[in-house]
Amino acid sequence: MKIGVSTLAINNNELYENLKFLEELDIDYVEILQEYPNSNIDVDLLNSFNFHYTIHSPIIDLNIASLNKSIQMASINEVGKSIDLANSLDSNIVVVHPGSVPFLARGYIDKVLVKCRESLITCENYAKDLGVNIAVENMPNIDDFLYKDINELNKLLINLDIGMTLDVGHAGVNGFLENDMYFDSIKHVHLSDNNHDHDMHYALGEGSIDFKAVIKNFEENNYDGIYVIEVNDKESVLKSLEYLEKL
């Protein structure tokens, strides 16, 4: 079982010290959240560690499904920077959010979905040229987010031959049961806990998600990707690792 940790838990100005913290935990896989204050990362710094990396593309102020062409293209360009970083690190996974529907665009949802599809195709084509793959994440139950329904996301991604990042916490708050969270397009997994109501990114074991059932289901379907712990702080990382050791 490949266990990784997202830098969401340590997204501050002390990246080197935080990576040392993960190194001391004997973590093999690290997901870099390429977001402020770590938008422009020193590749040599990352390569000074022996981690296998995945990249989470930035999300602040971005929307690949925007009806505003300038915003759409700027968002695609930011994903492209994450793909470039992944290529520099010999990483083959870049996590991408599918976008959102602003208030005034709600009457044009079909056009928004077309924009999302166009952007994903553009990003994946660029990624494939560099030996990288994007993996599109299912969203939590927050108003205006696209693809909260994993069935709809899976259908889109199968059609486009693009992978999915299955966020277990997001699936839980959208009513998906632990035995119903595996989908054929899944290439990457995020783990965090909640009580099936709000996307809290709790440490594993602090909410009500049955991760033993989730992982059993994935193993039965021969999933061989990484399970990335995506929680809020260092203490939650430690608790989550301890929880997984006891499964």
Image (cartoon, grey):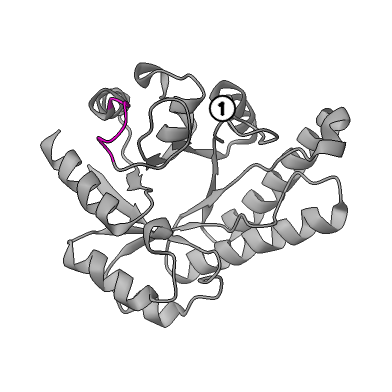
Which range is magenta?
A: 204-210
Looking at the image, which residue is at 33% across and 45% down?
Answer: 226
Quadrant of the drawing holding the N terminus: top left
Q: Secondary structure at mark 1?
A: helix
In this rendering, the count of numbered labels is: 1
Q: Is residue 67 above or below residue 72?
A: above
Name the side, left or right, on which 55 lies relative to 45: right
Q: Is residue 175 above or below residue 7?
A: above
Q: Is residue 208 magenta?
A: yes
Towards the viewer: 2 or 168: 168
Quadrant of the drawing holding the C terminus: top left
Looking at the image, which residue is at 58% across and 54% down?
Answer: 128
Q: Position of residue 202 (x, y in %)?
A: 35, 41
Q: Is residue 73 above or below residue 111?
A: below
Looking at the image, which residue is at 35% across and 17% down?
Answer: 179
Towards the viewer: 79 or 174: 174
Q: Quadrant of residue 89?
A: bottom left
> Principal SS element in the magenta part?
loop
Looking at the image, which residue is at 47% across and 36% down?
Answer: 199
Towards the viewer: 158 or 191: 191
Q: Quadrant of residue 45?
A: bottom left
Q: Amino acid at mark 1?
A: Asn
Q: Position of residue 172 (x, y in %)?
A: 43, 26
Q: Which residue is mark 1?
A: 154
